[in-house]
Amino acid sequence: MADHQADELEQALRRAVRGDVSFDTASRALMTMDASNYRRVPAGVVAPRDADDVAAVLAVCRERGVPVVARGGGTSIAGQATGLGVVLDFTCHMRGIRSLDPERRTAVVQPGVICDDLRTAAGAHGLTFGPDPSTHSRCTLGGMIGNNSCGSHSVAWGTTADNVHELDVLTYGGERVRAAQGLHDLPARLRDGIRSLAGQHLALLRTGFPELPRRISGYALDELLPEKNADLARALTGSEGTLGVVTEATVRLVEAPGARALAVLGYPDESAAAEAAHALLPYGPLTVEGMAADLVAGATGLPKGGAWLFVEVGGATREEALSRAQEVARAAAEATTDHTVVADPAGQRALWRVREDASGTATRTPDGSEAWPGWEDCAVPPPRLGAYLRDFRGLMAQHGLRGTPYGHFGDGCIHVRIDFDLLTEPGIRVFRAFSADLADLVVAHGGSLSGEHGDGLARAELLPRMYGTEMVGLFSRFKDLWDPEGGLNPGVLARPQRLDQNLRFDPLPRRPVDVEFGYPHDKGDFSAAVRRCVGVAKCRNESVSGDGVMCPSYRVTGEEKHSTRGRARLLHEMLTGEVVQDGWRSEEVRDALDLCLSCKGCRSDCPVEVDMATYKAEFLHHHYEGRMRPAAHYSMGWLPVWLRAASFLRAAPAANALAGVSPLAALAKRLGGIAPERDIPELAHEPFTRWWRDRVRETARGTGTGPGPGSARPGHGRTVVLWPDTFTNHLSPSVGRSAVAVLEAAGLRVVVPPKPVCCGLTWVSTGQLDRARTVMRRTLDVMAPALDAGLPVVGLEPSCTAALRTDLPELLTTDPRAARLAESVSTFAQALERYAPDWRPPRIDRPVVGQTHCHQHAVLGDAAERRLRERAGLTGTLSGGCCGLAGNFGFENGHYEVSAACAEEQLLPSVRAAEPGTEVLADGYSCRTQLTQLAGQKGRHLAEVLAERLP
């Protein structure tokens, strides 16, 4: 579309629509892709407020011949949520539950309702919405209706089509249609056309569709048969936005079991599991899910075997559910290698997380190679699944491909990501040839090309192989009845585009981009790192799950550009240079990354381990290269230098006094790019390293003060190097003194580096990577003797410890000392567990609240900390999410509101609700500062709590 046409379209939409109209570069870039292999660039995006807005958009676009694509959560895997023209984004405004009738077990919803929101609302009445794809925490009902989504519980509750009563639909031509059973409410043109189409082809409609539970491909024209009372709602479900735009839906709810139990059955291999699955259906399971060892390598809690079935059953009580699960396990015992039955809800959630994350984890093969959708969800009759899987594996081998099948074995539906080479012409030829051969194989087994996610751009071209040309001709006729101008999602289902057109990788650079980090898991290729994001959008979850972190800024703003996926999309478009044309200088990418807290939550919580904190640092480095930076990059990026200077000049008392004078503090904050709402932290009068040097001198003179935090008593066990990070050293030296006391009480001999060391974190987080490298190399020079001696290094500040573990070796890839230092680093609790395993901490016997530092969660893990707290009698769990301060982020001007909102998500409410006498734990300096400044609460490092109770 020419620029002047796009401008005119935008202005016309702004005049006609009350919702949000966005034709800017970032909004268009965010909508180029879904969770598929495909990419199409829209002219603009509209977030309608109601059905009248939708009608207005269609009228404006119809007048100009502009196509329209309806989009929900953007998690479609076949490309049908991408498109040219105008994208209708229903996730912003049209996401209400209009009514819920527990007696009739129905709900009336708008298309942007998140599946889990409906399930939660229904759960208050003991009901649920049956279909639950693995993206149920962020996919929308409109998208589920468009794709006829299913999920793991379809063996019990069916597909979305089985759970839709009525649909309110707008056609591209502007007709408002109430789709239900029967045709009497339709406009005459549609009613007569549908009757003619169905009446002339009754035999074909009765015999031309395979009988299987997961037949999603094509239009469900058999639902128009008179014996089905012409169920138009079912016929439109699964039409992928090509016939009409759903503005409201009446859906069926089902009774949720009072309790559930999970039987996990181990089998020798995948085929054995597949052949056993259908035999378990007579026991009335809620799910029969299957996966093999090559998908879940390293997962804990699974019974012995090479493949597993997850069989969930329900009951009125926990005992009844457990009994039914045990019955299933006994019935399957002859074929299984082992089994486990789990009735504990937390244990079930942990196991289900393995399955639900598979759509992301499957995008990397065991050797790290990329794998892609495209043949994500073929389905065959369940009794044929074992034979089909053997043939499927053989076909992959024949084409030199690899993949890890998993999925809904009870319904005969298989998900798989395959290591297609979609970057080269020979690889794309293989992709096309394999697709044709696999379509023939599926049809030979009586199956459907799509068993859940729809045909989209990925499979619609191959529908003649499944249905024949006569039936596909009827699909085109049906499309023309509803959309004679072809304005809704063109190129999908009817008259499809080639399956090797519009591939998302086509415009990417073929040579590696010049970058600073090593990207070891992506073979040094920044483009491959960005490609990690396949779009399953776990980062768009609107609440924290358990101890998860990702993605705090999205949960505050609700805007796609502030999700990990949104930022990855903008980086992808930056690399392609088509929509985002300014490369590393892009203001759109910078603005999206501005609210990234660099919490690293995505590094662990994203199923494919996208590391947006690293990508942000990389981008900032290039964006500001050779240019003036924001003031905060100089004030907080160089914080270690300023603090070291203040220590050398012994200026802490004067600096603290000046910070207490409001006009001077305000001036300092303005000059330093610091949020005016923030207090300037107080500097320690005596840094930890000065205290340590004095202590060493006293010990040498024989004047040690005896046991306690100031003790000069050396330990007699393993020697460990205590890392004097900037925050501990200059801002929280009591943490360092306490750690010395505890480590020595545990029998360890503590040493501290003889010269200043720094992990470089503040320079990394502000993208000053050249300076970060210089600092890191100096640190390695200081640490060389300790590394040569094989001494372990103990970190106290989680963010600095994580930087040593990841940022340092990824920036200094050619210096072997960097990897050695990274391998030697452990947290405070890990060091006690590894090097003083017999030490017993003092019993404190007190409840705790607080927060696990986001870098600890994402990079270091907190299992040792949990065990140490348990041994000390510190009971309770710490909050998930992020405190929101996140180093320099919460101090930077313009970030205060988001920073405070992150803290209000979990941390601050948990602290306020704590009983008197509860210990507030926060190992990170940022977390402690946030607690002090926003809640007036003093948080303490675990080392401080333990040191206080030492004998």
Image (cartoon, grey):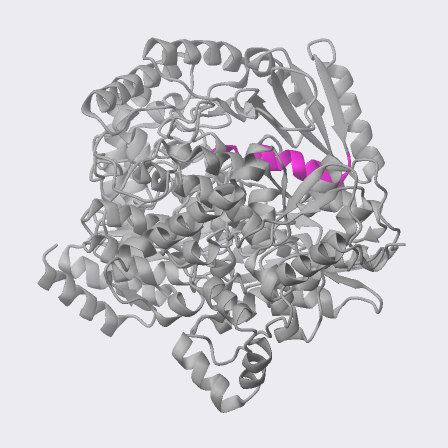
Left or right position of 539 against 268: left
Image coordinates for residue 805, horizontal then vertical, percent? 53, 42
What range of the chain is rendered magenta?
343-359
Count the numbered circles shown.
Answer: 0
Quadrant of the image containing the N terminus: bottom left
Q: Residue at x 11, y 60 (%)?
A: 3
Q: Residue at x 39, y 26 (%)?
A: 369
Depth check: give the residue in front, 253 or 323: 323
Q: Residue at x 54, y 85 (%)?
A: 658
Residue 320 included in the magenta stretch of the image: no
Residue 353 included in the magenta stretch of the image: yes
Depth check: give the residue in front, 669 or 343: 669
Image coordinates for residue 515, horizontal then vertical, percent? 30, 43
The answer to whether residue 70 of the structure is visible from this angle is no
Q: Name which quarter of the figure residue 5 lies in.
A: bottom left
What is the chief secondary structure element of the magenta stretch?
helix
Depth check: give the residue in front, 59 or 564: 564
The answer to whether residue 762 of the structure is visible from this angle is yes
Left or right position of 515 against 130: left
Q: Name which quarter of the figure residue 341 lies in.
A: top right
Left or right position of 797 against 711: left
Image coordinates for residue 481, horizontal then vertical, percent? 25, 44
Depth check: give the residue in front, 559 or 166: 559
Q: Residue at x 46, y 53 (%)?
A: 760
Image coordinates for residue 107, horizontal then vertical, percent? 57, 55
Residue 233, compared with residue 909, is above or below; it is above
Quadrant of the image containing the C terminus: bottom right
Residue 381, compared with residue 245, is above or below; it is above
